[in-house]
Image: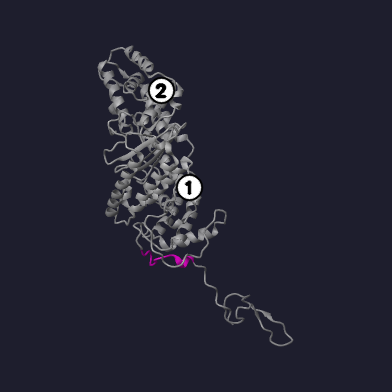
Amino acid sequence: MTEHIKMERYTQSLKGVFSTAQTAADRRKHVHVTVHHVLVALLEAGYGAGPLKRAGIDPATLLAKAAAAVDALPASATSLAFLGPEVLATMAEAEATRMRLAAPLIDIQCMYIAFTTRKHLPPEVGATTWSDGERVGNLDSTHSEKPMPLSAALREASAGFVTLADDIAALCGMPREPKEVRETLEHIRSLIEEHWPPFLRRGWHGPTLDGLVFTRDGGNDHSVMVGWDLRDGIALTISQAGQPSTRRFHLAPSKRWMSGDIELFGALRAAILGLYAEMGATAPSLPAQSVPLPSHGPAPTIEPFGADEPSDRLQKFMQELWEALVPPSGACASVQGELVRANGRLREELNRNGMGNYYPSEATEQLGDTMYSNLLVFMLDTLIANRSNALAAEEVAYLAAARRTIDTDWKQAQRIAELAGEDSPSDAQDMELRTLEEAPPQVRWDELFERTGRCIGNWCIANPILFDKSGSPVVSKGRTDIRSMLAPPPAPAPCNVCGGKGWRPAKSASDYPELCICKGGKAHAQ
């Protein structure tokens, strides 16, 4: 029966479909809810009609065949119907499809692709292009009656975000520049209007309930969504013609914003830049920091660390930072120290346990709930924010891509934890668990931590004044900055025998000058 399914992972439209299929099977005294019950419920609601037509399939004909299969089932049940094994296998395939597409929920597209994979529908159905409205169900009651134009929705989103940013700032005691966020959204709007006129050709209905304000506008080539929800955070979404998947960029949920662990604007900036990169379009010129700090003296003189140089200098610098900023236990007072601590602790976890303590032990654990995932999220999001333009664009792009991979990798680990916790798993669940466990790793941890170590070194060079997560100056282990660590070592005092020349004058006209034992180096006693 449907209550045995974890329905919170399904869109509202699909929840209604399974409820309808269950009711129909119960009313007709069928033993099982079959794939034909589900197909009838989908097609009678009109879900998937557009993609079916584009795949050359008549929805009415398909509905008639599915209804005939339901009519042929015997009415022999003595209790309520329960989900048949093929429905369970199809649902497991839909969940696998959701993970492959990086979709937040199992939607109608995921279900149809699962039907094609299980050979209940022709493969053309899964290969066709789906719009955002078709994915979630264009009859969803949460959609407003009138479409919201993209430009108007972005302006409304901008105003709402300023309020949200102010609320977060008040709760966390974090200084904010809401104007930059507002201008960023306006910049997105202006670039979309300038470069992608197809976006403005038609409007989509957008839900406005539960604190959610977003829009979907599209044309033949692309569609875009910008929005946020007080429960789920910010999301930027892009769909492209010819690709069955939708690229989604989900930012940190608001509970992590409230903890002050994530630079809100930095996360937004990274998602926007990633969105434009996926589009293959020119990215807007966004400011690199949301809370500028006052200047505190001249720029450091130490050379940044390059990708090809030997690691000895970097290792020495990172060790000096650790000794200067990281306490024997617990978190660091400064962001600089916390970055160094995070990278060190994560490297240690990789070497000792292969990141075993990083992953969720329960399916309900979210990215950031475990100690090591919290350190990783903080480290990456802080570096991606790129305060003081510390990192090259190529470095930021690499880190942003790694951040997206980590999100996907975590969702896969959640699914593994869920399947492993099943008391009586089905054959389909066993097969899915084996497939996930045998899949190659998504994250190259060694490469990532080598890259983040270099980035942290360069980030600290560009940000020598210590500050905490609220952006306020802070004293850490008696230090207010690391500028003394960045300056080159002072020149040695000249030799008190030769005056730094490296040789002693001849004692007589017949003698030769003598090589001083200092060889031009530091002072020494006679």
> Label 2: few (<14), some or many (≥20) within 10 Å?
many
Q: Secondary structure at mark 2?
A: helix
Q: Determine if the magenta segment contains residue 477.
A: yes
- Label the magenta part by its dominant secondary structure: loop
Specify start and end residues of the magenta stretch as a single range: 474-486
- What residue sits right under mark 1 in the picture? 397
Residue tagged by mark 2? 52
Q: Is residue 443 above or below residue 70?
A: below
Residue 274 appears in the rendering? yes
- Foreground residue among 376 and 115: 115
Between residues 122 and 416, which one lies in front from this camera angle? 122
Q: Is residue 271 left or right of residue 27?
A: right
Given residues 407 and 522, the one toward you in this image is 407
Q: Is residue 354 visible?
A: no
Q: Secondary structure at mark 1?
A: helix
Viewer-nearest of discs 1 and 2: 2
